[in-house]
Amino acid sequence: MGSAREVARRCEFDPAFQWLTGLEEVNYHTLADFRVEKQKELDELFTQVLAALSQEGLITLEQVMQDGTKIKAQASSRSYQQEQTIGEHLERARRRVAEMGDPGNEESNPRTKQARERGRREQQERLENALQELEKLQNRRHGEKAKSKVGVSSSDAHARVMHQSDGGLALSYHAQISAHAAQGLMVGVAITQEANDTGQLLPAMERIEERLQQKPEQMVADAGYTTRAAIEEMAQRKVDFLGSLPREDASTGRTAPQRLPPSAFLFQPETNR
C-alpha cells in the first residue's frame, strides 16, 4: 500500500491498523513526512531483511528477473500545467498566505483557521515544487519551442506523463522491480521518472550488488531492456543476460533497419551455440 492517504483512511476503521496504532488516527501528512525523512532508515531495513534471507539460503541470485510497471500518480490530468499558469496560481497562493495574518480575516473557529492556514501553505509548497521541477525539465530540453511545451502537475510535480497499457496517457511513476526467480522475493526496487525501460537494467543490477554485496549470475528481462549498450555492459561485467529481441513483422518478416531478426539466429547443436 503506497498511498499515505489510504493508510490514514484505514487507521479510522480497519482492525489491523487500529491495533498497530493503538486506536490513534494518524494524519496522512505525518505519514508522508515520516517516509521522506526516514528514507535511509527504511532502505537499511530492506537491506537487513534481504541479508537475513540470504543468510538462510533463500536468496542465491542465480537468476534475477527484471521488469517495470507504471503506477498512476494521485494527480488529475487537469493539474498538468505550463509555467505561466503555475506562476499565476503561485502568486494567488502567496497572497492568500499573506492575508492569513490580517485580523479582519480571522476565523471564529480556531481549528478551522488552522486547517485553512495549513492547506494554503501546503498549496504554496506544491506550486513552488512544481516550478522547480519544471525548471529541471526545461534544462533537459533544447530550444525555446521545446521548452514552451513543457509542463508538470501542480499537485504532484515529480510525476511524469507516460503511456499506459490501455493506450492512454496519465501522470505516472515507473517502478523498477528486481525479483529472485526461484523464490519470487524482491531483491531490488526503485521508482523512476523515465517513461520506458531503456537504460534501467544496469542501475538495477548495481542496486542489487550494492545491497547484497554480490552480483546476479543471470539477469532476465524483456525487449524494453535489450539494447546493444545493455548487452555489451552485461558481457563486460560477466553477468549472463537473457533478453528478448523485438519481434519481426509477422506479415513481411521485415524488422528494423540494421537489426537481425530472431530467425537469423540458428542453433547449432554440435557446437552448442
Image (cartoon, rainbow, N blue to C red):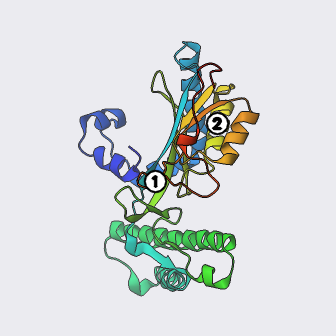
Is 105 positioned to the left or the right of 234 in the image?
Answer: left
- Residue that appears at 52% across and 48% down: 246
For badge 1, the amino acid type reads Asp
Please state which of the two labelled residues, at mark 1 or mark 2, is closer to the viewer: 1
| 10 Å crowding of disc 1: few (<14), some (14-19), many (20+) | few
| 8 vs 72, nearest the viewer | 72
For badge 2, the amino acid type reads Met
Quadrant into which the N terminus falls: top left
Outermost residue, top direction? Answer: 56
The answer to whether 192 is drawn above or below residue 180 in the figure is: below
- Residue that appears at 44% across and 84% down: 103
| 264 vs 161, nearest the viewer | 264
Alpha carbon distance from label 1 to label 2: 32 Å
Q: Position of residue 122 (x, y in %)?
A: 47, 68
- Residue that appears at 34% across and 65% down: 111
| 35 vs 227, nearest the viewer | 227
- Residue that appears at 72% across and 29% down: 238
Is 123 positioned to the left or the right of 218 in the image?
Answer: left
Is 141 positioned to the left or the right of 22 in the image?
Answer: right
What residue would you read off at disc 1?
A: 249
Q: Position of residue 113 (x, y in %)?
A: 37, 72
Is 238 positioned to the left or the right of 248 in the image?
Answer: right
Outermost residue, right direction? Answer: 236
Q: Position of residue 169 (x, y in %)?
A: 40, 65
Quadrant into which the C terminus falls: top right
Which secondary structure, mark 2? Answer: helix
Q: Earlier in the sequence, mark 1 or mark 2?
A: 2
What residue would you read off at disc 2?
A: 205
Asked if the residue at tag 2 contacts the one at tag 1, i.e. Cβ–Cβ closer than 8 Å, the answer is no
Q: Position of residue 29 (x, y in %)?
A: 44, 55
Query: For residue 257, what is the image quadrant?
Result: bottom right
Which secondary structure, mark 1? Answer: loop
